[in-house]
């Protein structure tokens, strides 16, 4: 057998091993709701893993490997979770706060600062450790803060701060 076939076989075997999910180096601060979502995700993955494992020889090996990888990641995130006190201030932006701000074009946006695993920009849930989150954290109503964006820095003005729900 030629050396090329040995390398191809090795490459094929490695392709079945999913790439590990990278765990963020920032502290895993999250809201109480974020913790509940994280716990639900682990429960869901454990259930799916159990169902797939129960198939025995008929189990989808790639699916099992992917589920095991995701379980390792989310269990690690759960272990490192640091639930923050509920955001109650209307004066200062905290993790969990809803913030309405305006840019120089007077466009208004309303977002909530949340933990990394809860973030979903389409729902207005922004990671507190993102460039926008870091710009807003600790700001007060009326403050202008600099949002350092890859597309160019932008000054934004804090219009309203609401407690997290």
Image (spheres, grey):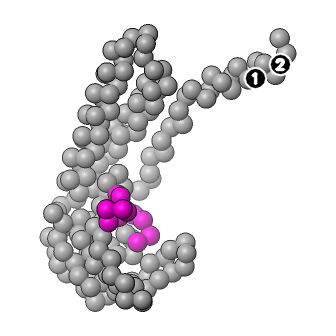
Residue extending farthest right: 2
The residue lying toward the viewer, choosing from 75 and 49, is 49
Residue at 45% of width from left, 53% of height from top?
Answer: 25
- The quadrant in which the N terminus is found is top right
Q: Is residue 116 above or below residue 106?
A: above
Measure the alpha-carbon separation of dots 2 and 1.
Answer: 6 Å
Determine the image quadrant of residue 49.
top left
The answer to whether residue 139 is above or below residue 46 is: below
Tell me if mark 1 has few (under 14), some (14-19) or many (20+) residues whose alpha carbon lies within 10 angstroms of its own. Answer: few
**Quadrant (top left, top right, bottom left, bottom right) of the C terminus:** bottom left
The residue indicated by pointer 1 is 7
Q: Residue at x 19, y 53 (%)?
A: 32
Residue 124 lies in the magenta stretch: yes
User: Is residue 83 something one can see in this rendering?
Assistant: no
The magenta segment is 119-132
Q: Is residue 141 visible?
A: yes
Does dot 2 land on a helix, a strand or a loop?
helix
Find out whether the residues at labels 2 and 1 contact each other: C-beta distance under 8 Å: yes
Give percent across and percent down for residue 95. Answer: 27, 65
């Amino acid at each position: 057998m030629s050396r090329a076939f040995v390398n191809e076989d090795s490459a094929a075997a490695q392709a079945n091993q999913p790439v590990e999910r990278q765990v963020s180096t920032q502290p895993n601060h999250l809201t109480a709701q974020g913790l509940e979502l994280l716990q639900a995700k682990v429960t869901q993955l454990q259930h799916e893993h159990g169902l797939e494992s129960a198939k025995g020889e008929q189990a989808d090996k790639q699916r099992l490997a992917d589920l095991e990888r995701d379980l390792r990641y989310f269990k690690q995130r759960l272990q490192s979770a640091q639930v923050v006190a509920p955001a109650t201030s209307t004066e200062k932006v905290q993790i969990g706060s809803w913030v309405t701000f305006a840019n120089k074009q007077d466009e208004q946006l309303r977002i909530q600062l949340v933990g990394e695993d809860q973030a979903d920009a389409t729902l207005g849930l922004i990671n507190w450790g993102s460039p926008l989150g870091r710009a807003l954290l600790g700001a007060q109503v009326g403050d202008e803060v600099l949002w350092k964006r890859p597309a160019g820095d932008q000054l934004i003005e804090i219009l309203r701060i609401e407690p997290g729900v």
